[in-house]
Image (cartoon, grey):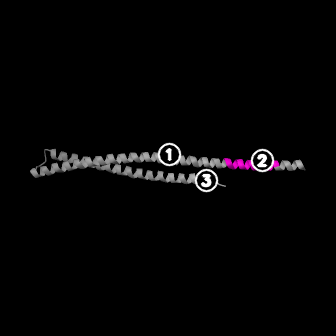
Amino acid sequence: MKPRQCWSVLEGKAQQKVSQVQADIVRARTVLETLNGSYKRLQFLYEEYRLQGAGASVITHGMQDAMNHRQFMSQLMTLSERVVQDIDKATVALNALYKKMIEAEGERLKMQTLDEQEILAFQMHSRKREQRSMDELGVSQFNRIGRS
């Protein structure tokens, strides 16, 4: 007779879920780092063009160039705002994954505890059965000796 394997199987499934969530967290962190890098590059580019337009040594080629410059600056700002929105969404998603990770780890620990309890209960049952057998053997030997 062996202990039931159901808890160890459930613990394995819970561990797989924990591993999956960990992989999702790594991917989400990578996306967030990429977005932060994009935001920094956009800010740098915007500042560079702003200084270029404000510089005294800039030679203006006309009204069209000035309009193009302003339009490009506006597009950079729009892109920056979009990246900030994406960063916010990625942060919310990452926080949700952390919460999911805590829940998955709690479930795994619960299954591990139940598995350990099952093993301990089986060991205790085995010891009791073994002790009962030893007691029966001792009583039968005692009775045999008493009859002789």
Task: Give the residue type at disc 2.
Answer: Asp
Q: Position of residue 119 (x, y in %)?
A: 62, 49
Mark sitting earlier along the chain (3/1): 3
Q: Which residue is label 3 attached to?
A: 4
Who is closer to the viewer here, 27 or 148? Answer: 148
The numbered mark, 2 or 1, whose residue comes first in the sequence reads: 1
Give the camera-side residue of 52 and 7: 7
Q: Residue at x 37, y 51 (%)?
A: 30
For the residues marked 3 and 1, what is the alpha-carbon distance in whole angstroms?
22 Å
Mark closer to the chain start, 2 or 3:
3
**Quick one: 132 or 12, which is closer to the camera?**
132
Q: Quadrant of the N terminus?
A: bottom right
Q: Which residue is mark 2?
A: 135
Residue segment shown in magenta? 124-139
Callout 2–callout 1 Cβ contact below 8 Å: no
Q: Amino acid at mark 1?
A: Gly
Label for residue 106?
Answer: 1
Q: Is residue 61 left or right of residue 6?
A: left
- Return the residue nearer the eye: 111 or 50: 111
Q: Is residue 137 left or right of residue 73?
A: right
